[in-house]
Amino acid sequence: MLVERLKEPNTELYRPALETLRTLIRTSTSSMTSVPKPLKFLHPHYRELQTIYEGWLASEDKSLFADILSVLAMTYSDTEPRGTLRYRLLSSSLRPSASSSPLSTPGSWGHEYVRHLAAELGEEHNARTLGEDVEAEVKPVEEVIGSTEELQELAMECATFLLQHNAEPDAVDLLEELEIADRIAELVDENTYERVCQYMIRCVNLLPTPDDRAFLRAAHRIYSEHLKFPQALALSIRLGEPELIRRDFNAPANPLMKRQLAFMLARAQIPKEWLDSEDSIDESEEMPEDLLDCLSNTHLSMHFKEFGKELGILEPKSLEDIYKSHLENTRVPSANVDSARGNLAGTFVNAFVNAGFGNDKLMVEAEEGNSWIYKNKDHGMMSAAASLGLSLLWDTDVGLSHVDKYTYSSEEHIKAGALLATGILNTGVRTEADAAIALLGEYVDNKSVPLKTSAITGLGLAYAGSHREDLLAILLPHVADEGVSMEIASLSALALGFIFVGSGNGDIASTILQTLMERDDKQLEEKWSRYMLLGLALLYLGLQDGSDATIETLRAIEHPISKQAVILVEACSYAGSGEVLKVQAMLHHCDEHVVKSEKNDKDKDAPEEPPKDDTFQAFAVLGIALIAMGEEVGAEMSMRTLNHLMHYGEPIIRKTVPLALGLLSASNPQLPVMDTLSKYSHDNDLAVALNAIFAMGLIGAGTNNARLAQMLRQLAGYYHKEPDCLFMVRIAQGLVHMGKGTITVNPFFSDRNIMSRTAVAGLLATLIAFTEAKGFVLDKYHWMLYFLVTAMYPRFLITLDEELKSFPVTVRVGQAVDVVGQAGKPRTISGFQTHSTPVRLGTTERAELATEEYIPFAHVLESFVILQKNPGYEKEDKMEL
């Protein structure tokens, strides 16, 4: 009847008929599975209504009619695409600008209509950007479909409705599809911003390059506007932009909040210089001392030892406590022989296990002249003296006095080890005394090679991530000087890579590029050249397309080394980004050499060609893990890819796969990875077995994982006649019990959202040594295992009161659960246990306060968290009383 009304010549009947239709459609209810009745009955009349509509003159009635047709078009979406959107835009164009009645908003037609409209908006935008013929079936297209601005405005209206109705992910997806995701900040309020930001941050890993940073910036802006300083700072650190970090750090007026932010910056190893604003130089001088202490990690050692005391693990562990050799099923009774290799392994095990506690029996507490150093030979003494730095890690005051006595040794290697120890114990801690540069600077130009390399490496470790300009003058000349050996030049480049990690420093990059161009081929073919390339690559860690110019320059170098360099720089630039296209590019490099090697086998003209040429594949395999490790789905997929490479790859690829697996789940021993590595550790190719054993140590680093410890004990029996493999088993045992189970080397923190660049640099430098284990770690450069120190950090949660003193409260610790996009307020942890702080947190664990008595200043309970008494808590208690 109502449709018939619209056909009649009497125009006065139109308005009531349309109003009745609108009311009927809007108020009809139906079950989830059936079409609403009015739409069902009007479906056959749709064509007729379209014809009537075309005959009407522009008016407000016609606008209302277009609205109704837009709703009806939902039933014709398969035969007449984007009809809902077409009539919606027509309705808007016919409506007088003054009339924006609540009934004309898309939301007034209900949720299903808005979702339908959102889908068509996305299709329309894609059709336009792809340049397709927009809607061939709907006749007068050009004059109907609105401009891009109109589409965007309509999208904003739909997003507003979706946000009001708990559909935050849909709102973000719609705006992302129309490429205006940054405008979501205009729509959110205090009820929706948290869920919107969480969803956007989770999307980052799945987005292509420019969009991912845009999402982070949009979420950062929302957090800043809602005064959520820790969340905003976490995103600034991920973006790695000094300007944003400075602004976020200086934003809060509350001194306690500022100290909490300082703890976050110290954990991420952000250079202090970034925080001093250029316009106010006095500000840096006025920074309160306790704030400086938070920024410099000054009290890390003290808190770590207290933490050990709480857990009852302060007592030093002996080597036998770790090896438990009585449980090894070796047929030959092991005679107690002091073999140099065994003692060297003992050096590292003792250092890793007692790291940070400063009380091990072999080195620190040993009587004068009875020190473990003298149980080693030549270059073994260097590692032994350096292990002192690991035992006294972060304790700069006591540490230097212990190390000092060895710097006067007449034995060159002991002196070199003492220099390296000085660098190691200053890692990650900044002091006012700045002892490392004072003590090591003078040895950089020493004639003795061990002293020189130790001083250079020590500086690199001590100032990792500090971006200290004064170190450029000390180290850069050694990179550029053609007179020095490739070893010195490469280690200087690596030290600069550590110090300026992720800075994109142009001076260093151009100097390294210049060196690569000027050195002759013979020098570039040395094993050391890979560290020169790594030094260059670390400058671009996490900068994504910031390395494009350097990559182009590298491609111009006519030497196989340029390919290795391009792969390393690309992998580092996209480290932790999960960028799929880059992973594919790395895979292409892995299959490329297969054909070449066959040719070489047939021709046999150049016996040296394959080993020289295929190093780039080892870097490509590490590149896959490096890029994928940032997000779970990618990491899981890359594990399957690495298994395929293990079956079909060349020997160089096969021996690097275990290292890549180790990098993917550092300090995170998942069962499938453990079993895979256990299988590889019995491989016929000893190079594969060796790297698999080291990777087992890496995935279990600092976890005390009983299953891994058992596997390694079996391997010790299995390889008791293979000195190299046995040495590696011992090292792995030391790593699994690192810091007696309290230190992690996983580069991700803050709920696994932020990647520590210095940690990635340390892991990479160590793994690169294993791509040529015979030449480095198993030769006289075993001290390269100490590169791991930049990735070592306590895995604890310590709650502090307002005086920054340790303050025990009850917390629940359980496995982290991803709750993004779930309705309501679901639990963020599962299978929790209640403890009193300080507590030890696993890589995939999360903590939350068990009472509401205190409010934490940090958004993630990890590392140091400052608590404040909840002012509303006592009132509730009194009310209950």
Image (tube, rainbow, N blue to C red):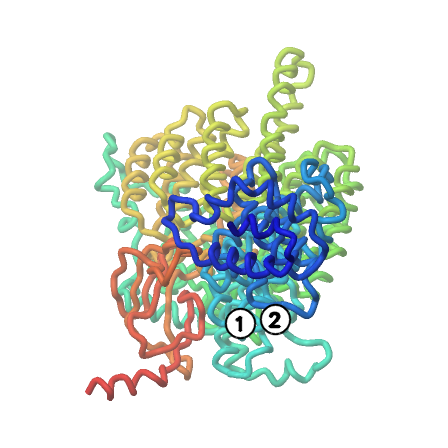
Tally of numbered discs:
2
What label sits on residue 296 in the rendered view? 1
Picture quarter with the C terminus:
bottom left
Query: Disc 2 designates what residue?
Result: 272
Residue 737 visible, this orientation: yes
Q: Position of residue 410 (x, y in %)?
A: 54, 58
Name the residue located 60 percent from the left edge and 38 percent from the top edge: 80
Say if 633 sits above or below 256 in the image. above
Instruction: Kindly report the distance in space between the C-alpha atoms of the residues bearing marks 1 and 2.
Output: 8 Å
Q: Position of residue 609 (x, y in %)?
A: 67, 23
Name the residue located 47 percent from the left edge and 43 percent from the top edge: 633
SS category of the residue bearing label 2? helix
The outermost residue toward the top is: 602
Name the residue located 69 percent from the left edge and 43 percent from the top edge: 486
Report the side of 869 relative to 479 (left or right): left
Amino acid identity at mark 1: Ser
Say if 281 sits above or below 738 in the image. below
Can you tell which quarter of the image residue 430 is in? bottom right
Residue 184 or residue 730, whichever sits in front: 184
First in sequence, mark 1 or 2: give its number.
2
Pointer 1 with pointer 2, Cβ within 8 A: yes
Q: Residues within 10 Å of mark 2 (few under 14, many from 20)?
A: some
Amino acid identity at mark 2: Lys
Residue 116 or residue 312, whichever sits in front: 116
